[in-house]
Amino acid sequence: MTFVMGPALLFCPADRPERFQKAAERADAVILDLEDAVAAPDKQRARGAILAQLGGSGDGPELDPSRTIIRINPAGTEDFEKDLHCLAHTPYRSVMLAKAESASQLRALPDFHVIALCETAAGVVHAPAIAAEPNVVAMMWGAEDLLASLGGTSSRNDDGGYRAVALHARSAVLLAAGAAGKQAVDAVYVNIPDLDGLAAEARDAAASGFGSKACIHPSQVAAVRAAYAPSGEDVAAATHLLEAAKEAGTGVFQYQGPDDRRPHPPARGVGAPQGPVGSTAPGSPPSSSLYSGRHHFRARREMGGIASYSGVRTQRWPVSRNSARVAKRYR
């Protein structure tokens, strides 16, 4: 299964049911948190809140399962088993496994689509094996618990940037996800009032290849969406390219523009909460409807073609029906 939620994933404490619908309305997907956001004495009440919002017999759940993730407690804990017992009575099958540390832990979740949250030293070191598990649809990293697992005190320097060890973990999880053909989710930005800092970090996440970014407050959603949104100029360029590919058919064709061989990281169009459509074949990078650095787009391999900029042959630019749909949407 391809992970298609995002780009803005909003955490919501599972023991605050009055916030469930608001969180779902304000973000591309909601993460109901049964782990860190809920105190130990309140966890059972939080599970009850998830069950209560399912409604009576025959009623659908308050939250759309295709846009809802449940963060469950770490494998091997009593709360983990209780979380699974709760979810067995719900339609929710997308879970985020907190403090994922080994591939064997993922095998205890065969009936779920798992976002593996690597937020300990063991989790980061074993990220490639975790990402390779077939039920893992995405990888996420976490900075604060990671530093705590190392005996550190803070994930960031005085200037607000990540310490070297946090940057290493971020890259390691991203690379593990990419190598396994899975999506990667960037960590939360905990300084809620600093929207400029969040915007810069979200832009870096999008440019680096993260498919989405987690938020801890509704006020952060707009900045994350903006970081992943194609500009009008980007959409026009993609539209023109798709039209040129359609007109040319298969094979090599000429497309006027500057020769540019920079990477083309995936980006979603904001306003399309269904997210990217991509391949999860092991070893294949996730693909999306529009691939954006500035002014550069790539689409999936369904109508093969090689674009040539001003007569200079560059990389293969496959074109898909889905890309045409998204480009049309933004005209």
Image (cartoon, rainbow, N blue to C red):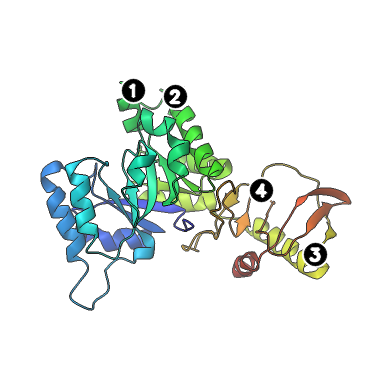
Apparent side of residue 79 relative to residue 124 in the rendered image (left or right): left
105 versus 59 height, above or below: above
Q: Residue furthest right?
A: 311
Apparent side of residue 127 relative to residue 38 in the rendered image (left or right): right
Which label lies toward us, 3 or 2?
A: 3
The answer to whether mark 1 and mark 2 are in CB contact below 8 A is: yes
Which label lies toward us, 4 or 3?
A: 3
Label 4 to label 3, Cα distance in Å? 25 Å
Label 3 to label 2, Cα distance in Å? 46 Å
* Residue labelled with disc 4: 294
Residue name at image x 31 percent, y 48 percent? 108
Query: Could you say which is closer to the camera, residue 157 or residue 276?
Result: 276
- Location of residue 279 (image quadrant): bottom right
Label 1 to label 4, Cα distance in Å? 38 Å
SS of the residue at dot 1? Answer: loop
Residue name at image x 45 percent, y 55 percent? 6
